[in-house]
Structures are given as C-alpha cells and as structure tokens.
Image (cartoon, rainbow, N blue to C red):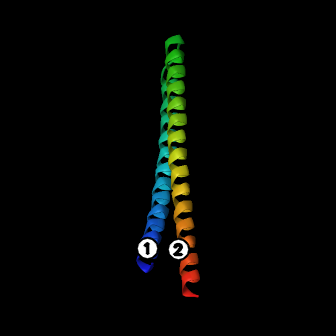
Amino acid sequence: MEKERKRLEKQLEESVNKRRKLEDIQIGLIQLNRDKANILVNFSEAWQGKKADETMSKLEDAVEEEWRETRQYVNALEDEIIEEKRQIRIQLEKLKENAKNGAH
C-alpha cells in the first residue's frame, strides 16, 4: 500500500505541475492577445479608407474567434486537470481508509 500511496502522491504532484504550466501558458496567451490588439490598433492608425476598414473588421473578427477557440481549449484542459486531481485525491483517501481499517 505504501508503494501505491507514493505513486498516487507523485501523480497528484504531476497534476499540480500541469496546472502551473497551464497557468503560465494562459498568461502567455493573454499577452499574445494584447499584442495582436496592439497590431490591429497600429494597422488602423496607419491605413485609412473603406478597404482598410473592411480589412480591419475581418482581422478583428478573426482574432476574436481565435481567442474564443483558444479559451475554450484551455478551459477544457483546465477542467481535465481539475478532474484528474479530484480522482487522485479520492484514490488517496480510499487508500488511507483501507490502511486505517486494515490496521485495526
């Protein structure tokens, strides 16, 4: 049982590390999105006229759609990690209960 407990604790630690890495990625994605917004602002300041407005609108729509899709994907990953941690904790609790019941 000790071996199983250590394995589960290691899995839990790996899950926590996944969550931290995902948070770092989220921060990077937010910065990337800000950079894209700045590019769009610079574009709109540099170009004028109907064609520029149409292009700007298309670019804004594309950036917004990409951001929504990225957020959905990241949120799904985050949900998976949360569920993984929850399942590992449940297994650890069961293992502790079994050890406690077997010790008496």
Decide: few, some or many residues near mark 1? Use Cα within 10 Å; few <14, some 14-19, many ≥20.
few
Residue for point 51% across, 58% down: 84
Q: Which residue in the structure is indicated by mark 1?
A: 4
Q: Which residue in the structure is indicated by mark 2?
A: 95
- From the viewer's side, name the closer residue of 102 and 88: 102
Cβ atoms under marks 1 and 2 closer than 8 Å: yes
Residue type highlighted by circle 1: Glu
Residue type highlighted by circle 2: Leu
SS of the residue at dot 1? helix
Above or below, comparing residue 4 to residue 75 in the picture: below
Decide: few, some or many residues near mark 2? Use Cα within 10 Å; few <14, some 14-19, many ≥20.
some
Residue for point 53% across, 45% down: 76
What percent of the width, then of the height, locates residue 8?
A: 46, 69
Residue 11 lies in quadrant:
bottom left
Residue for point 54% across, 31% down: 64
Query: In the rendered structure, which disc, 1 or 2, sits on the residue that comes first in sequence?
Result: 1
